[in-house]
Amino acid sequence: MILFHHIPKTAGSTFHKILDNAYSADKIFSINGLDPEKSIQEFASLEQDERNNFDVVKGHLADKLEPYISIKPLDKIIFLRDPIEHTISSFFYLKRASWNKSYERVKKIRKLEDFINYRTREGLNDLQLRHLTGQTEFLLTGIKSDQTVDAALLEKGKQILLEARFVFLTDYFDYSVLTLKKQLKWKYNPWYLTNNKTNNRPSKQNFSDNEIDLIKSFNRYDLELYKYARQLFMQKYDYKSDKSLMTQVRRFRRINNLRNFLQLNS
């Protein structure tokens, strides 16, 4: 069974669609991101053989479903993103995401510095590590997080990455999905149209050194986690030396970009 632990703003929404196309709908259990608690309760209420009959379990807080699954080991899939890009993308995404509980507060914020200060007050620093290690009760309760992120939690996060079958990086998304196609023996090409993309946002280069330093301070442990995930990725997949797959990646990217262009302009 595949368990896709979707960490926000890591290309997860796009990857959901790829999984939806790779597996039968009746073999997929997806957590409703707007009401994860209801989905968790629904999954827990199923009989054990019903829970074990899924090929894919996926969504935000998918780790909360692990205790209800007796099939071991799970083929866990995790994507992580450069924490600087993750923070910038989150800021501009939340300013437009009217369905998100943070929208009313964030839409009024003009400066990245003020956004980081707000998130810090809410206990939402190092958000990727929090999601990875299950420090996400604030998403279920709506109450400000008072859970501490520290070196011990970072070590727990590293262990989770070490034990996961697939640890990928958003920066290498096309390579990652083609790797999955090969290793999981998908019979279709995982073409995709990017979902939940934050369009027209400033790039990292548009921010001052002081702002970048503030992001780094806000993501102290996420930076360490991402560095470790990158090491695992490069060691496991020998990315630059896999000439055959790199040729496939370049061809896949050209065709996928053309498909996107034609679809968006049809």
Image: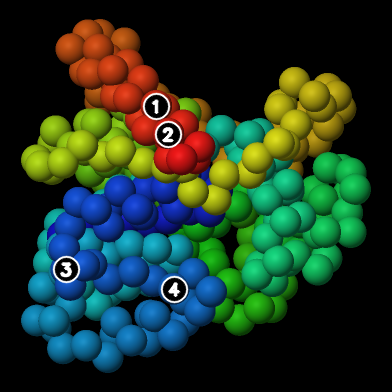
Q: Secondary structure at mark 4?
A: loop
Q: Identify the residue at image location x=61%, y=81%.
A: 141
| Quadrant of the snapshot with the N terminus | bottom left
Q: How is the image coloured?
A: rainbow
| Disc 1/disc 4 C-alpha distance (Å) | 31 Å
Q: Decide which of tag 4 and tag 3 comes sooner along the chain.
A: 3
Q: Which residue is mark 2?
A: 262
Q: Is residue 42 left or right of residue 71?
A: right
x, y (%) of residue 166? 27, 41
Q: Identify the residue at image location x=24%, y=31%.
A: 178
Q: Decide which of tag 2 and tag 3 comes sooner along the chain.
A: 3
Q: Identify the residue at image location x=36%, y=41%.
A: 192
| Amino acid at dot 4 | Asn
Q: Decide which of tag 2 and tag 4 comes sooner along the chain.
A: 4
| Disc 2/disc 3 C-alpha distance (Å) | 31 Å
Q: Identify the residue at image location x=23%, y=18%.
A: 248
Q: Which residue is mark 4?
A: 32
| Amino acid at dot 2 | Leu
Q: Is residue 246 above or below residue 14?
A: above
Q: Which residue is mark 1?
A: 258
Crowding at dot 4, Cα within 10 Å, few <14 / some 14-19 / many 20+, comes out as: some
Nearer to us: label 2 or label 3: 2
Nearer to us: label 3 or label 1: 1
Q: Which residue is mark 3?
A: 27
